[in-house]
Amino acid sequence: MVMKMEILYIILLSVSSAFVMFLLTKLMGNKQISQLTSFDYIIGITLGSIAAEMATSVDDGFEKPLTAMITYGLIAATLSILTNKSIRIRRVVDGKSMILYENGKIFRRNFKKAKLNINEFLTECRLLGYYDIADIQTAVLEPNGRISVMPKAVSRPVTARDMNIVPNEEKPPIAVIIDGKVLKNNLKFTGNNEIWLKKQLSEQGISSIRKVFYAACDCENNLSAYTDIKEMPDYDIFS
């Protein structure tokens, strides 16, 4: 009986710690892994460790780890507000960009500051599509650890402006069906209704909205629909 109560208590603490982590994440702001600064990364790991401790603190109580989680979350949220208001604080907390390469010159001191070697730099350049750094005008190490590259004018892709072409403005397609359910507000925003939607699906050989896994309407009022196919392909194009 005691064991069952302890297990139930751990389950409740786990759910509570997950809920607190969710609230703290919303408070601190959502960021992708590639956007995290070193401070954000450390705070994230620390909060995760404290949450795990809180979930299993059967004997010691959950008040101390909960207090620590809230404190760390408030520190991160406060620093986020301060970095948005002050450039100086932002540079201290987030760091600043460093030029690694510009106009045929490699700045070795910045490589040392960034703890980056030439092989890692060349790898990042290749991942960005530049196998020859002679095609690069400037390479910058950003505060989040990513390398951004500005190619030389002769190496960048040709744009419509280069060819004196003025293309029509494009807008992202609007989802109108997801998982067999009509997104009525989105459909209304496109200026269409369900009668139009069913007619478009019928013209594409789709008899029921429930069979549609995803459908979207583009800026020219064309519908692209994808049905939920149960079969699995029996080939591997990457083998």
Image (tube, rainbow, N blue to C red):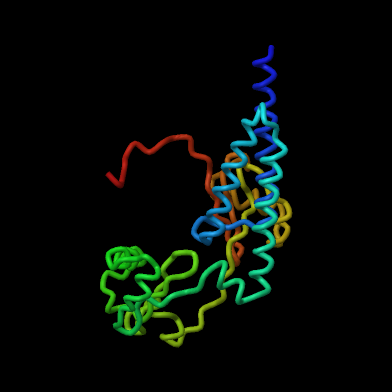
Above or below, comparing residue 12 to residue 22 in the picture: above
Q: Nearer the viewer, residue 37 or 186?
A: 37
For residue 24, side relative to residue 109 (left or right):
right
Residue 224 rendering spot, x and y as whole percentages: 55, 55
Q: Quadrant of residue 155?
A: bottom left
Above or below, comparing residue 170 to residue 221 in the picture: below
For residue 13, side relative to residue 207 (left or right):
right
- The quadrant of the picture occupied by the N terminus is top right
Residue 14 rendering spot, x and y as whole percentages: 65, 33
Question: Which residue corresponds to the image point at 67% horizontal and 39% vertical from the top-left?
Answer: 17
Q: Nearer the viewer, residue 38 or 188?
A: 38
Residue 73 rendering spot, x and y as whole percentages: 67, 53
For residue 100, side relative to residue 196 (left or right):
left
Work out which residue is located at the far bottom of the displayed protein and give it: 164
Work out which residue is located at the far top of the displayed protein and give it: 1
Above or below, comparing residue 103 to residue 46 in the picture: below
Question: Which residue corresponds to the image point at 45% horizontal and 81% vertical from the top-left?
Answer: 160
- The quadrant of the picture occupied by the C terminus is top left
Number of disc labels: 0
Residue 78 rendering spot, x and y as whole percentages: 69, 62
Q: Nearer the viewer, residue 26 or 40?
A: 40
Q: Quadrant of residue 113?
A: bottom left
Question: Which residue corresponds to the image point at 32% horizontal and 76% vertical from the top-left?
Answer: 108
Q: Quadrant of residue 192?
A: bottom right
